Image: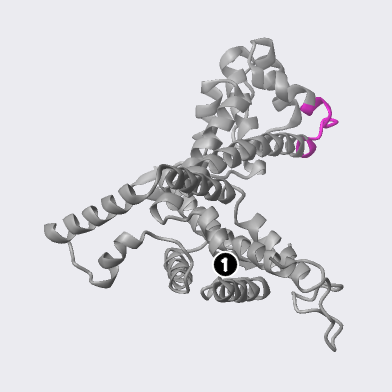
Amino acid sequence: MAISSVLDVAVGLAFIYALLSVLCSGLNEWVAQMLGRRGRFLREGLRNLLGDRWFYLRLVNHPLISAYRRDAAGRAQKPSYLPSEAVAQALFDVLVVKASQLDPENKPARDSEPLDFKQVRDAAAKCREEGYAIGTALLPLLDQADKDIAAASKAVAAWYDSAMERVTGWYKRNARNSLFLIGAVMAVVLNVDSIEITRTLMRSDSLREAVVKDALAASATGKIGGVQIMKDGVIVTPSPDDIKALVAAGEQLEAKGLPIGFSCLAPAFDAKPGSDAAGIRALVKECAKAAKDTSGGAMILKVIGWLITALALTLGAPFWFQLLNRLVDLRGAGAKPLSASGKDGKGGKEDGAVTA
């Protein structure tokens, strides 16, 4: 097989994985919103950061923080994001309140005046003296602020941002696990067998050319099936309508000969037998016969193909779009010729640079 054909197969696979990855990401984001996954990770991160349930409850119910809750169907939803400046200001208030409880005789007279540096520093020292981890964590940050409450607030905000970066890492690892599960279900339900797809692309010149044509269009425009998938190097989260359009794009690939889906289910879409018992029994019987006729070795190979697809989808849509762009540039033998304006065809990047 010619090197150019092998490269076309790679382009086709990258395009197919990019399409499926966008679908997986959209489904994963929908599940995350339904389960409030981002808010759950934020709350867990705050608990670990503050080290005490009392501080956590006081902080999340502080007016500066509770304002970020969203009301949905008559109930408040936990926020999935909190600005660091608001957290720092609220935490200073909570520190002073706790210190006043620990030492009522030295309760500061606050009234409506804003907190000053000495109040916050004394409160942190009192909390550390009583064994609270938050006092131990904040006191060095306050001592580096040179008695400037604004500088102290910025230092605590940066400390909070650093902690939230770790929480983001936890969320991404969890999202990858979810992507694998969703990708595995998609691979099995849609019968997206990477091994069979590769074989078919290698054998069929017409299918390979058709898939490469779609891949080149996606690389040039950032669109698949008319849906804007990538813009300015960033993946655009698809809406429910976009997902329908992407599914339709997948059906078009199937119509061109891409081996996805189960042939035994074709009557369900062609004849549309409905939900009558006889039609369902006929489909089940046909699929059972097809599975029985498949040898053990072929079934093992198919399961491996499904597993490869699921693992590929965990890499995410950004990875596959970047790889697709690189393969397209490589297929075009390097840099594209500059136009009269001195720019190439990819967003004004010169010298054939790949759009990330």
Q: Which of 59 and 221 is in front in this view?
A: 221
Q: What element carries label 1?
A: helix
Residue 154: quadrant of the picture: top right
In terms of depth relative to the viewer, which is nearer, 289 or 354?
A: 289
In the picture as drawn, the residue positioned furthest to the top comes out as 130
For residue 60, above or below residue 311: above
State left or right for residue 5 relative to residue 26: right
Q: How many marks?
A: 1
Location of residue 207 in the rendering, given as x and y in whole percent from the top left corner? 54, 73
Q: Residue at x 71, y 22 (%)?
A: 137
Residue 133 colored magenta?
no
Expressed as whole percent of the image width and height from the top left, the position of residue 132 reads 63, 15
Judge left or right: residue 55 versus residue 77: right
Q: What span is in magenta?
A: 141-151
Q: Mark 1: give few (<14), some (14-19) or many (20+) Cα within 10 Å.
A: few
The residue under the point 81% across, 35% down is 148
Instruction: Find residue 82 and report its image quarter.
Output: top right
74 and 300: which is toward the camera: 300
Relative to 46, is 228 above or below?
below
What residue is pinned by disc 1?
Answer: 203
Here the colouring is one colour
Residue 84: image location, x then y, percent:
66, 42
Residue at 64% x, 38% y: name it.
169
150 vs 9: above or below: above
Image quarter of the C terminus: bottom right
Q: Is residue 145 magenta?
A: yes
Q: Position of residue 4 (x, y in %)?
A: 72, 69
Q: Which amino acid does label 1 sit on?
A: Arg
